[in-house]
Image (cartoon, rainbow, N blue to C red):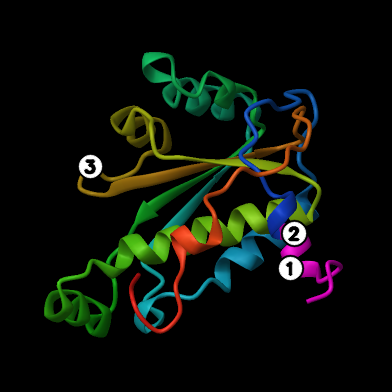
Amino acid sequence: MDESFNFLSLVKARQSDRRFDATRLVEPEKLNYILEAAQLAPSACNAQPWKIIVVDQTDLAVEIGKAAAGLGMNKFAKDAPVHLVIVEESGNLTSILGSKLKNKYYPLMDIGILASHIALAAEDCGLGSCILGWFDEERFKHLLEIPSKKRVLLDVVIGYSLNQKKIKKRKAFKSIASFNKYK
């Protein structure tokens, strides 16, 4: 395919950014674009087993960022002006039944796809992002008034990146894919 193919260019440009301009807010139209891309993310049986809490209030975003910075991890999160906190919700009956019958927990896969849509849409808007799974879940629940029985699975931080673009280092194609049989 032609290198100018838009989607592949977008995928090549997207990276996990860990430095954000804390003084530059994300414009509402860009945030709405990202949320529309999230809304359109596919899920098993169209269950959409998620709730996205948009944290764009500066003081609260800093507090959420601090809650993501446990044990020295994710110290940069406090500088991200937006956090999209993803809470697992119940799937629909078909998805729940399918998960049990096939012994595959579809909501986790679905939320991974959702996070990918968010990160790619952010890149398309000229924004940086990083998908975080390491954070103080109980602190998130307290700060965002999330019911105690809910699971907070991811925090996608978004903002104007201060990182330079890098060429991705990936495994060789033949080590991650094969045609027609496992080899």
Whether residue 2 is in magenta: the answer is yes
Separation (CA) of disc 1 from disc 3? 39 Å
Relative side of 25 to 157, left or right: right
Q: Are marks 3 and 2 in contact (CB under 8 Å)?
A: no
| Segment colored magenta | 1-10
What number of labels is visible? 3
Does residue 151 appear left or right of residue 46 in this picture? left
Task: Name the residue beneath numbered marker 2.
Answer: 10
Where's residue 163, x and y in %?
Answer: 74, 29
Q: Amino acid at mark 3?
A: Ser
**Is 129 colored magenta in this rendering?**
no
Q: Is residue 31 visible?
A: no
Q: Residue at point 78% right, 23% down? A: 23
Distance between mark 1 and mark 2 Cα atoms: 5 Å
Q: Residues within 10 Å of mark 1 (few under 14, many from 20)?
A: few
Evaluate whether residue 182 shows in this view.
yes
Q: Three-letter amino acid code at disc 2?
A: Leu
Q: Are marks 1 and 2 in contact (CB under 8 Å)?
A: yes
Indicate the quadrant containing the C terminus: top left, top right, bottom left or bottom right: bottom left
What amino acid is labelled 1 in the image?
Answer: Phe
Mark with earlier residue (3, 2):
2
Element type at marker 3? loop
Mark number, residue 7: 1
- Residue placed at 34% from the left, 43% from the top? 146
Secondary structure of the residue carrying numbered label 2 = helix
Question: On residue 148, which mark appears?
Answer: 3
Q: Please state the horizontal and vertical placement of residue 107, each as a whole percent of the image.
A: 31, 65
Is 70 displayed left or right of 7 in the figure? left
Residue at image coords 20%, 47%? 149
User: Could you tell me residue 132's position as x and y percent?
Assistant: 47, 38
